[in-house]
Image: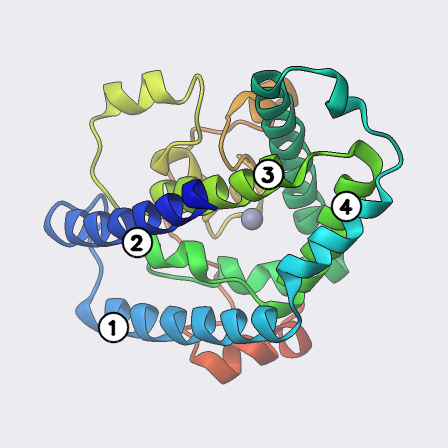
Amino acid sequence: MEIEFLLSVGSFVLLLLLLVWELYKPARMYAPRQKKNSYTTNAEIFLCNTVVTYVLSVGLVFVLVSEFAIHNMFEYVPVVLQYVLGILILDLLIWFWHMINHRIPFLWSFHQTHHAERYLNVTSALRFHIGELLLSVLFKSCILIVFGVPLYVFFLYESLITIFAMFHHANIALPARVQNVLEYVLISPRLHQTHHSDKRQEHDSNYGVIFSWWDILFKTKNRATPDTIGLSYGGEKNLWSFLLMPLVDRK
Ligand SMILES: [Zn+2]
C-alpha cells in the first residue's frame, strides 16, 4: 500500500512537471484555444471515468477475479522474478490489446476517441472513453485468470502505465539523440507522436506502453514524423461529444 501511495504522489508530481515543461519547451506549437479545450475536456473525462470506475469498484473486481486464476506458477519463482516476469507479460499483452483496438472496428469505435485529440499533451494520457476502460477491465481480468499474475505485480504495473503514458504523451522537446537511445528500450514521446498521426499507416504503429521491444519484435515500430496530430475527422470535443463519438463517428 505504501508503494502505491508513493507512486500516486509521484504520478501527480510528474504530471505537474510535464505540464510546465511542455508549456515552456514544447515539441510542437499549438494555439492557446486548442490547449484550453484539451485541458478542460481531459480533466472532465478523467473525473467522469474516476467516478464510474469507483462506483463499479473496478479495483475490487480485479481482487475477486484473481481468486479464479487457473494456476499459480508465480508462487514457484522468487519475488524479484515475479515482478520482472509479471511486468513483461502484462506489457506484452497490453501491447496486443492496444493493437487489436486499432484493428477491430468495434474496439476502434471507442479507442478513436483517444486519437481525436488534436493537441497531444500530458493530459491526453487520461483521455480514454469509459467504454474502452470497461472493455479493458474484461481483458485484464482474463490476463489475471489465465496467467495468475499476482495482484501486487498487477497493481504496480497499473501505476507504471499511468507514469509512462504521461511521459510519452507529453509535448516535450527532447534532444533527438536522447530519444534515439531511449527508443531501444522505451516508447519515447517521438514514437508516440507517430502513433497519434492522422494517417492510418502511421497511427497503426508503436502500440507499446512501456517497452518498445514488442513493436521492434512484431515490426510495428515506426519513426515517421507526422504532418498532423489527431484524426482528420471528429473535430475538437467537449465531454458530451467525446462520449457520443463511438455512436456518431465510425471510420
Ligand atoms: Zn492507439
Residue 18: numbered disc: none
Disc 2/disc 4 C-alpha distance (Å): 28 Å
**Residue 193 can be seen in this image:** no
What amino acid type is highlighted by mark number 2? Phe
Decide which of tag 3 and tag 1 comes sooner along the chain. 1
Disc 1/disc 2 C-alpha distance (Å): 20 Å
The residue that mark 4 highlights is 66
CB at disc 2 and ligand 1 closer than 8 Å = no
Give residue 86's quadrant in the image: top right
For the point 44% across and 31% down, the residue is: 187
Q: Residue furthest right?
A: 70
3 vs 2, front mark: 3
CB at disc 4 and ligand 1 closer than 8 Å = no
Decide which of tag 1 and tag 4 comes sooner along the chain. 1
What amino acid type is highlighted by mark number 3? Tyr
What amino acid type is highlighted by mark number 1? Lys
| Residue 109 located left or right of residue 129 | right
Q: Residue furthest left?
A: 24
- Residue 19 percent location from the top left of the image: 22, 54
Residue 152: numbered disc: 3
- Residue 30 percent location from the top left of the image: 22, 59
| Residue 143 located left or right of residue 227 | right
Marks 3,1: beta carbons within 8 A: no
1 vs 4, front mark: 4
The residue that mark 2 highlights is 12
Q: Residues within 10 Å of mark 2 (few under 14, many from 20)?
A: few
